Image (cartoon, rainbow, N blue to C red):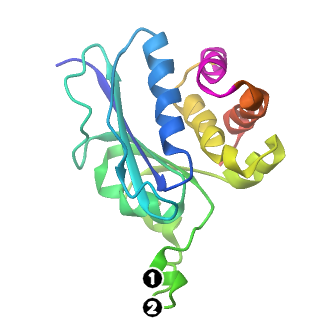
Amino acid sequence: MSNVTSVLIVGVGGQGTLLASRLLGKTMMDLGYDVKVSEVHGMSQRGGSVETYVRYGDRVYSPVIDPGEADVVLAFEQLEAARFLPFLKKGGTVITNTQKIDPMPVVAGSAQYPEGLLEEIKAQGARVLAVDALSLAEQAGSVKAVNVVLIGAMAKTLGTEPDIWLKSIEATVPPKFVEMNKRAFELGYAAES
């Protein structure tokens, strides 16, 4: 069996999961891996849950990640990290934004946002890297850079060097946003949980 790494990227519509999956896919292709990226699943409108699968390795036959198979769950919001925890393999890593975005039942007043999610995720045996990506994105120049901050945190966790990621940002992001996204990546790469 070939060595394949599976990354599940989850968030809320409008948070930039698609750009994150493009950056991960391009970087891994540039590193010489076979890469498969799924389409975005879920409600791509603002506010709906969104998931994207990225798998890379010597030879990848399918982009699909089944429950218990993800090496990394990259979550742009805490509730999404908890929701997709069943996809994480034993001993896997959850990299999550500390930000909380109220889902519609909470906004409508029919539910409350669950407390203690990060502790619950850790109690399930996952390695957790929690990053205040919203503050770091603001520091980089835009709240919309949360996705790239989290990609930076993941890049360090994967043991990859920043230079190849910065080249992917240059190739993937519109020119007027490149420098801001590079700052966001570097802040994420330097982030401590």
Q: Residue at x 68, y 50 (%)?
A: 133
* Amino acid identity at mark 2: Ser
Query: Label 2 near label 1: C-beta < 8 Å?
Result: yes
Q: Position of residue 65 (x, y in %)?
A: 26, 41
Instruction: Using the image, tell me which numbered label, if any, was put on residue 170.
Output: none
Farthest residue in the left direction?
Answer: 1
Local SS, label 2 = loop
* Amino acid identity at mark 1: Pro
Majority SS type along the magenta span? helix
- Who is closer to the viewer here, 140 or 159? 140
Residue 34, picture quadrant:
top left
Q: Residue at x 41, y 52 (%)?
A: 126
Characterize the local packing of mark 1: few (<14), some (14-19) or many (20 or more) Cα atoms within 10 angstroms.
Answer: few
- Who is closer to the viewer here, 28 or 126? 28
Q: Position of residue 165 (x, y in %)?
A: 61, 21
Whether residue 88 is in magenta: the answer is: no
Q: Residue at x 63, y 24 (%)?
A: 169
Local SS, label 1 = helix
Residue 71, picture quadrant:
top left
Q: Residue at x 47, y 77 (%)?
A: 104
> Over which residues does the magenta segment extend?
162-174
First reached walking from the N terminus: tag 1 or tag 2:
1
The residue identified by callout 1 is 105
Characterize the local packing of mark 2: few (<14), some (14-19) or many (20 or more) Cα atoms within 10 angstroms.
Answer: few
Q: Position of residue 41 (x, y in %)?
A: 33, 49
Quadrant for the N terminus, please.
top left
Work out whether 4 lies above or below 184: above
